Image (tube, rainbow, N blue to C red):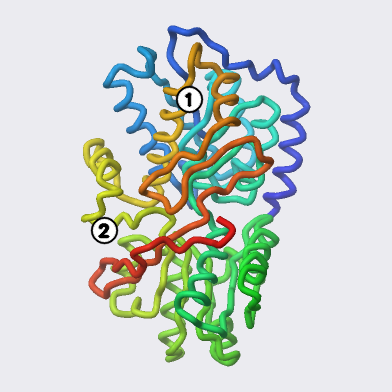
Amino acid sequence: MRTSHIARILAAAVLALPVAACGSGSGSDSGPINIGSVSTLSGPVTFPEASAAAKAVFDDVNAKGGINGRKIAYTAADDKGDPASAALAARDVIQNKKAVALAGGASLVDCQVNGPLYQQNKITDVRGIGVDPGCFSSPNISPVNTGPFFGSTVSLYYASETLKLNKICAFFVIIGSTANAYKEGVDRWSKITGKKPLITDLSLSANTTDFTPYILRARDAGCEAVLFNGVEPMLIGWVKAAQAQRVKGIKWLFLAPAYTVEVAKALGPAGKDIYALSEFEPYTDQQSAANKDWRDTMTRHKLPLTSFAQGGYLAAQHLVTVLRSIKGDITRESVTEAMKNLKPLPSEMTGLPFGFGSGNAHASNLAAKFVQPDGKGGWTVLTDDWIKLPNG
């Protein structure tokens, strides 16, 4: 894919626009508070639950009178997973909708394409689900989730420090410009633990369908655990290929996309060697007090209970907290100032508080819990306590 190259061209083109062309989002002190998001809502890979969950939070705030009497007007723009559409969607949200902030977005390309635009227009984005590397390297974007790159570090850390495994391997599907971010995730684990993987393979792509060569390579190398970052269809194919080759004794470490009811049902008893990462308090634990308000909100609005919905809900909740803290008019300038001076916001749904602040990059959720298919279509929580990176 040429996503990174296209993104740089579009970002440069967007930055060539005068700052004033996109508007200040100042609005008035009596009209609606305009909030936006740019998400991948259509195309082969979509994340609709995040922005839908954010909207549910804002709708509930509006039903109770809004923020100091002002209602929230929320726009969820669709970038279709396409860099050109992402650039147009962001400009529409900023210029035409006059958003004072963004929240609850989840996109394949938005951060990479529009991060410079958000910085230029001094607008902040509380990202529901950070997907691409740009989400974790921008001064104006802060995701509430762990993300795939820090998630890789946490997963490796869990394997070596909790499961006490020494021979650990990693195989990564590379889409766009993610190779370096995944490599940095592995290097981060090595720096923390002083350990190195037996294998770090960055050669898989979205078109890879035959996983047998990689599984046999892991077996022959003596890997005790293998980290694989594939999405739902790929990781199911990975496990089935391992079964077909009668490969046993290896623990398969999967990232957040594995943690779905559909995956547990598809794998059945074959999931006994899987360890999946949960970026938030595990949503399949119906007894969790930490998830009660989120679960009630999603159920009331008839939205699916997924980890993507957790991210959108949390992003909206954090932004509402910031909006309520602002004294005086709520404008793009006042929201950005409040974000840049924000003290960490704790949540029982995450292992670490949410942060924004004045840094050049933001990744506050450096923690996870781990779950395992129970063989009956559900999930078992393996870690009562959060697995946190030492530098978290």
Residue type at mark 2 is: Asp
Contact flag, marks 1 and 2 (Cβ < 8 Å):
no
The spot of residue 323 in percent (x, y) is 45, 24
Residue in the picture at 32% in, 71% down: 373
**Residue 89 visible, this angle:** no
Q: Is residue 248 left or right of residue 88?
A: left
Residues packed near mark 2 inside 10 Å, few (<14), some (14 to 19) or many (20 plus) = some
- Rendered view: 2 above or below 218: above
Q: Which mark is residue 286?
A: none
Tag 1, which secondary structure? strand
Residue in the picture at 61% in, 66% down: 205
The spot of residue 265 in percent (x, y) is 29, 68
Residue type at mark 1 is: Ile
Tag 2, which secondary structure? loop
- Residue, disc 2: 285
Q: 103 or 112, which lies in front?
A: 103
Q: Is residue 364 left or right of residue 7?
A: left
- Residue, disc 1: 35
- Rendered view: 390 above or below 193: above
